[in-house]
């Protein structure tokens, strides 16, 4: 909350409202309902400062500002855009009425999460992107724009099967150029995941399952095409069962795959715990 005075009125109300919405809550200590509305608005808007600024006016100490707005009584809240009143609340408000009021003017939760995911993807912050877009999809799993970003995250994290399954749910009306590009990426990912080199190694290991070198090579190939869980599973088994002559190389490869995963990735945490349990 930003307390408005005559000194900061021009900057925090007039200028700020040219960039984003400003909600001015008028209150007075002797009117508990106005304090309650101010505090409820603060809670509701705590994570939305990018879209709206909450300003407060103490009508006891800043009566001149209240008069400029023509405030007749409190609780009152006025929503401003470009220094002009856009909407408002008057009288005591419950949580539902506040939510209805804010929903008319603020982006939906899934829209905020979608933009966060896109920004994280641009910065190659895959874990942040995954968390944001998964939450958006949980809120609304019917929107094509949310699905397409989630598909992109799936592809970048090696979840080709999940990406392809979700692509198949995109309606024809939404199959735009972004959809076509992701479809091409899925096809390339599938080809890479089942390259001749990988198929050859899988065939050899089927014949000689205990060959450590072949298993290490296959794990390295899996890692290169984002089949990280399969790579880690093979390497952990080698570290767990190998003798001293092969264990160090397998452990080195295992740690290399872990390092390639984003910080905080659940898969990395899972296999780090497994390795820690094995060592200690």
Image (spheres, rainbow, N blue to C red):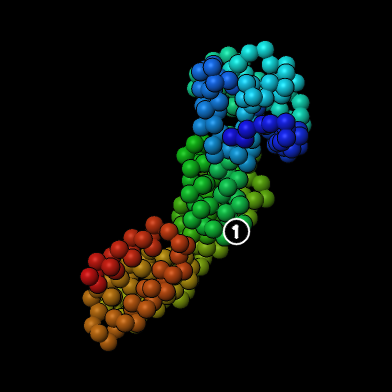
**What residue would you read off at disc 1?**
123
Q: In this view, does 271 lie to the left or right of 77?
A: left
Give coordinates of residue 54: x percent, y percent: 62, 32
Q: Look at 48% across and 71% down and name the residue there.
A: 224
Q: Look at 24% across and 72% down and name the residue there.
A: 279
Give coordinates of residue 66: x percent, y percent: 69, 20
Q: In this view, does 23 lie to the left or right of 249?
A: right
Q: Label 1 neighbourhood size at 10 Å, few (<14), some (14-19), many (20+)?
A: few
Observer-nearest of 64 and 231: 64
Give coordinates of residue 16: x percent, y percent: 72, 37
Q: In this view of the protein, can residue 67 be seen by the observer?
A: yes
Which residue is farthest bottom?
245
Q: Is residue 234 left or right of residue 63?
A: left
Observer-nearest of 60 and 274: 60
Tag 1's secondary structure? loop
Observer-nearest of 261 and 4: 4
Q: Look at 75% across and 21% down and name the residue there.
A: 68
Give coordinates of residue 11: x percent, y percent: 74, 37
Task: Locate residue 38: give its quadrant.
Answer: top right
């Amino acid at each position: 909350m930003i307390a408005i005075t005559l000194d900061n009125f021009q900057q925090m109300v007039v200028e700020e409202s040219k960039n984003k919405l400003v909600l001015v809550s008028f209150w007075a200590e002797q009117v508990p309902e106005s304090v309650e509305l101010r505090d409820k608005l603060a809670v509701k808007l705590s994570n939305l400062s990018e879209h709206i600024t909450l300003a407060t006016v103490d009508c006891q100490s800043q009566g001149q500002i209240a008069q400029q707005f023509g405030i007749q009584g409190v609780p009152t809240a006025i929503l401003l855009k470009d220094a002009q009143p856009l909407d408002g609340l008057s009288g005591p408000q419950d949580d539902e009425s506040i939510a209805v009021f804010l929903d008319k003017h603020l982006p939906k939760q899934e829209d905020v999460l979608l933009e966060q995911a896109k920004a994280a993807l641009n910065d190659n912050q895959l874990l942040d992107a995954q968390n944001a877009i998964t939450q958006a999809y949980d809120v609304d799993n019917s929107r094509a724009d949310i699905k397409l970003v989630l598909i992109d995250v799936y592809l970048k994290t090696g979840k080709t099967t999940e990406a392809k399954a979700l692509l198949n749910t995109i309606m024809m009306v939404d199959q735009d150029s972004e959809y076509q590009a992701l479809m091409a990426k899925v096809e390339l990912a599938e080809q890479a995941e089942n390259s001749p080199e990988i198929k050859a190694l899988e065939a050899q290991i089927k014949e000689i399952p205990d060959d450590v070198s072949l298993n290490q090579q296959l794990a390295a190939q899996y890692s290169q095409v984002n089949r990280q869980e399969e790579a880690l599973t093979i390497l952990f088994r080698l570290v767990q069962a190998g003798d001293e002559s092969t264990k160090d190389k397998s452990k080195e490869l295992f740690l290399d795959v872990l390092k390639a995963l984003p910080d905080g990735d659940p898969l990395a945490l899972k296999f780090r715990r497994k390795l820690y349990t094995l060592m200690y």
